[in-house]
Image: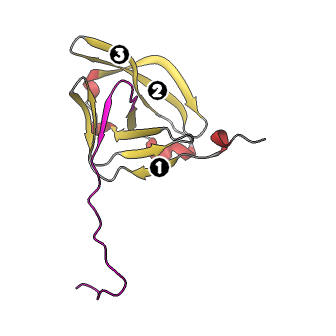
Amino acid sequence: MVNDVQTTRPDLIAAGGRARALFEGHELADSARALLVTEPGGVRAVYFPAEDVQTAFLRRNDHATASPWFGAATWYTVSRDAKIIENVAWSYDQPLDDGAAFAGYIAFAPEHVEIQLDEPAPVPRVDAHDPPYV
């Protein structure tokens, strides 16, 4: 029997609004260009463009993991206000083909960082019988 978790690819969409990552109330990332990924099993992660991340508070560590879809992950430790937390963020420096969209992005572990997502602006509803707008 085939395990769906291993064969189902993650869904990737634009976050649709502003996304922020906060550590102990301090902003680590703020972006209007974040990507939202839902992996099989419902696990969600927000990926921020590295240029929208305050990388001065992050340093690479030796932890390593791999995703069957995205490849080898590089992990980071956060150091802020005399607090040091291991494995708070990860990135795919050389992602596999399925993870190409993540090159240059950093995601944060929700158990260590508060993720805030703005709701995208509502799209006005136009009924089929309404005349086209000029």
Residue 117 image offset from top left, x and y in percent: 30, 44
Q: Identify the residue position indicated by label 2 in the image.
A: 74
Residue 118 vertical position relative to residue 127 in the rendered view, above or below: above
Is 49 displayed left or right of 41 in the figure? left
- Per the model, the C-alpha gap separating discs 1 and 3 is 28 Å
- Per the model, the C-alpha gap separating discs 2 and 3 is 15 Å
Residue at 34% x, 45% y: name it: 34
Residue at 31% x, 73% y: name it: 125
Q: Identify the residue position indicated by label 1 in the image.
A: 12
Circle 1 crowding by C-alpha within 10 Å: few under 14, some 14–19, many from 20: some
The kind of residue tagged 2 is Thr
The secondary structure type at the circle numbered 1 is: strand
Quarter of image, res 69 = top right
- Per the model, the C-alpha gap separating discs 2 and 1 is 20 Å
Of callouts 1 and 3, which one flags the residue occurring earlier in the amino acid sequence?
Answer: 1
Q: Find the magenta span and give its range.
A: 108-134
| Structure colour scheme | secondary structure
Residue at 34% x, 40% y: name it: 48
The secondary structure type at the circle numbered 2 is: strand
Of callouts 2 and 3, which one flags the residue occurring earlier in the amino acid sequence?
Answer: 2
Nearer to me, 20 or 68: 20
Q: Are marks 1 and 3 in contact (CB under 8 Å)?
A: no
